[in-house]
Image (cartoon, helix red, strand yellow):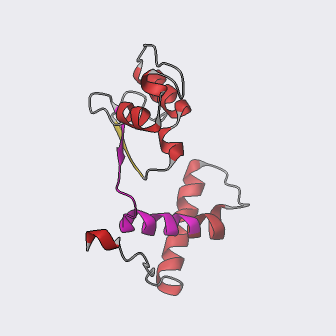
């Protein structure tokens, strides 16, 4: 959001509580210049519950909003697996001289990873019996 403070942003996220936090509500409000009483966490207003915070964060009228994907959505889990590999094999304990250096090293890693290490991820979630 800092790279283009006036742009519209849509974040696709899973339903972890961190994606519905009080601090995230306040961050979005700050960046969208929304001034109102948010209530008290766990008691009232927008901050009352994760559901009320998620409703605020997913409001389509804000230039920054969150789209909450269903639980057990396989394609997002696949992306999370890929980023975990990237972090463990390249980013962790690395240093970069610039954003361009970071970008170059990530692209080099992808060029190396795809022909030598890539293999299909095994998806093990079979669904809920009540939806079969």
Does residue 63 lie above or below 113 as drawn? above
Residue located at (47% from left, 30% from top): 25
Residue located at (41% from left, 75% from top): 125
Please, which residue is most extreme toward the right here? 93
Q: Residue 101's spot in the image, x, y percent?
A: 59, 56
**Foreground of the two, 66 or 118:** 66
Q: Residue 91's spot in the image, x, y percent?
A: 64, 61
Does residue 76 lie above or below 128 as drawn? above
Residue located at (46% from left, 14% from top): 37
Q: Residue 76's spot in the image, x, y percent?
A: 40, 62
Does residue 37 lie above or below 126 as drawn? above
- Residue 42 located within the stretch drawn in magenta: no
Q: Quadrant of residue 63?
A: top left
- Residue 66 located within the stretch drawn in magenta: yes
Please, which residue is most extreme toward the top here? 36
Please, which residue is most extreme toward the front here? 130
Residue interval drawn in magenta: 64-84
**Foreground of the two, 14 or 33:** 14
Q: Quadrant of residue 55?
A: top left
Q: Residue 106's spot in the image, x, y percent?
A: 54, 64
Quadrant, the C terminus: bottom left
Picture mark count: 0
**Foreground of the two, 27 or 85:** 27
């Amino acid at each position: 959001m800092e790279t283009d403070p006036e742009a519209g942003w849509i974040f696709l996220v899973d339903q972890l509580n961190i994606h519905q936090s009080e601090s995230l509500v306040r961050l979005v409000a700050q960046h969208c210049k929304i001034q109102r009483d948010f209530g008290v966490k766990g008691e009232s207003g927008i901050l009352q519950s994760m559901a009320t915070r998620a409703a605020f964060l997913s409001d389509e009228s804000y230039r920054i909003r969150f789209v909450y994907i269903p639980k057990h959505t396989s394609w997002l889990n696949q992306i999370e697996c890929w980023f975990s590999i990237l972090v463990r094999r390249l980013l962790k304990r690395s240093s970069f001289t610039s954003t361009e250096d970071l970008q170059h090293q990530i692209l080099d890693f992808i060029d190396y990873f795809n022909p030598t290490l890539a293999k299909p991820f095994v998806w093990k979630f079979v669904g809920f019996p009540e939806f079969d």
